[in-house]
């Protein structure tokens, strides 16, 4: 299998006269684990600036933590943080470059902000007349889809694409969706992969998994995150500050054994739960002993993370109505931003989650509408 970065390096003469910016972090490596920064420079291309997304160039900053501007210690190139002031960062593109390469490993989930960063750069290309070249990489959790389409009024930095929550697309295909929506075809180019199809799990690609952010240490975490990311919209700990982020879910006021029994009674395919006791070192309930469940994926081809975690939220809310809360900020309920709708929260509050899922979950037929924009064989599901 050949990733977009490799193909770019093989066709480097096409970009020899360009002034280049690069949007990346430490996940942007060659198959033999060289940094894309170094590989691009060694190819003789005129790389002038690096833009880092949320979590920073080294994927070390916590979620939501502002990242300062710095320079790359090996090359001396300026590193401009796009988080949280991404519009200001994009205004500076033309000071350095006429072409921006985008090379980051995505996780395949709509509210993961790297595809939101990509949208911002494509919007910037339209407004400021520079080119965006996306170096495609695999969707690590396959081309399977799960979830629903967002409502336009809930578009935000955690809901930037009109795709299901687990969208089944590569970041190159997401770029083509944005280009179509923004009429930016002439400004957006995707360097596709060879030998890839979306039946593959990441391990089947032969690539090394380099964690793209602090709390996605493994491919399995990325899969669980597709559902457990919704825990961020509640006052439950999603296991940040533990060795099992997104696999550990709980709070100080939960009975671990009762919740585990309730979840295992569902007999969801591909997953089992164990009672969990954990003390997060950061984020919600930091320093407190939490009880809850630990999520064990027994068959990832059957596991449906979004459905499973939403039923977990419904179960906790029903069992602990005096303690359970939705998290809020100045924009309202965070769960609504993550879900791209208020109807999910309202359904859980009304005890009608089953109706929401039955009425809104998209099927593989959704992909038929995207067929002209797809780049690889898709397994659907």
Image (spheres, rainbow, N blue to C red):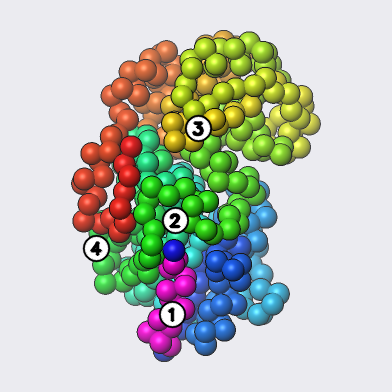
Q: How far apart are the two marked residues, 3 and 2, measured between alpha carbons?
A: 20 Å
| Mark 2 / mark 4, whichever is N-terminal | 2
Classed neighbour count for the residue bearing mark 3: other residues with Cα under 10 Å, few (<14), some (14–19), many (≥20): few
The residue drawn where x is 31% and y is 41% is: 380
Q: How far apart are the two marked residues, 3 and 1, measured between alpha carbons?
A: 38 Å
Q: How far apart are the two marked residues, 1 and 2, measured between alpha carbons?
A: 19 Å
- Name the image quarter holding the N terminus: bottom left
Mark 1, residue position: 10
The residue drawn where x is 37% and y is 17% is: 354
Discs 1, 2 touching: Cβ within 8 Å: no
Mark 4, residue position: 183
Residue 10 falls inside the magenta stretch: yes
Mark 2, residue position: 138
Mark 3, residue position: 299
Residue in the foreground of this view, choosing between 330 and 286: 286
Residue in the foreground of this view, choosing between 31 and 23: 31
> Which residues are the magenta region?
2-16
Discs 3, 1 touching: Cβ within 8 Å: no
Residue 317 location (% of width, % of height): 53, 16
């Amino acid at each position: 299998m050949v990733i977009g970065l490799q193909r770019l390096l093989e066709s480097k003469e096409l970009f020899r006269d360009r002034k280049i910016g690069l949007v990346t972090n430490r996940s942007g490596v060659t198959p033999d684990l060289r940094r894309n920064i170094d590989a691009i420079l060694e190819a003789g291309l005129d790389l002038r600036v690096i833009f880092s997304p949320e979590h920073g160039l080294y994927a070390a900053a916590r979620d939501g933590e502002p990242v300062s501007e710095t320079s790359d210690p090996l090359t001396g190139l300026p590193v401009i943080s796009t988080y949280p002031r991404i519009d200001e960062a994009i205004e500076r593109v033309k000071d350095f470059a006429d072409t921006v390469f985008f090379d980051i490993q995505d996780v395949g989930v709509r509210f993961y902000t790297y595809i939101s960063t990509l949208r911002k750069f494509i919007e910037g290309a339209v407004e400021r007349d520079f080119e965006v070249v996306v170096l495609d990489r695999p969707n690590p959790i396959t081309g399977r889809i799960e979830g629903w389409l967002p409502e336009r009024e809930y578009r935000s930095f955690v809901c930037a694409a009109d795709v299901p929550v687990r969208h089944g697309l590569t970041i190159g295909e997401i770029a083509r969706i944005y280009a179509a929506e923004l009429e930016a075809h002439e400004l957006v180019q995707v360097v596709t992969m060879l030998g890839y199809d979306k039946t593959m799990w990441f391990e089947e690609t032969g690539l090394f998994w380099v964690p793209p952010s602090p709390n996605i240490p493994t491919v399995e975490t990325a899969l669980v995150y597709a559902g457990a990311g919704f825990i961020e919209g509640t006052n439950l700990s999603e296991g940040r500050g533990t060795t099992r982020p997104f696999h550990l879910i709980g709070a100080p006021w939960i009975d671990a054994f009762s919740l585990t029994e309730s979840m295992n009674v569902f007999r969801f395919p591909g997953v089992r739960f164990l009672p969990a006791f954990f003390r997060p070192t950061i984020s919600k309930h930091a320093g407190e002993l939490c009880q809850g469940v630990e999520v064990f994926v027994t068959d990832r081809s059957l596991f449906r993370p979004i459905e499973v975690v939403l039923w977990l939220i419904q179960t906790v809310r029903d069992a602990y109505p005096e303690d359970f809360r939705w998290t809020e900020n100045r924009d309202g309920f965070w769960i609504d931003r993550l879900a791209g709708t208020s109807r999910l929260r309202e359904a859980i509050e009304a005890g009608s989650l089953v109706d929401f899922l039955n009425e809104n979950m998209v099927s593989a037929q959704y992909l038929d509408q995207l067929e002209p924009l797809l780049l690889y064989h898709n397994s659907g599901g």
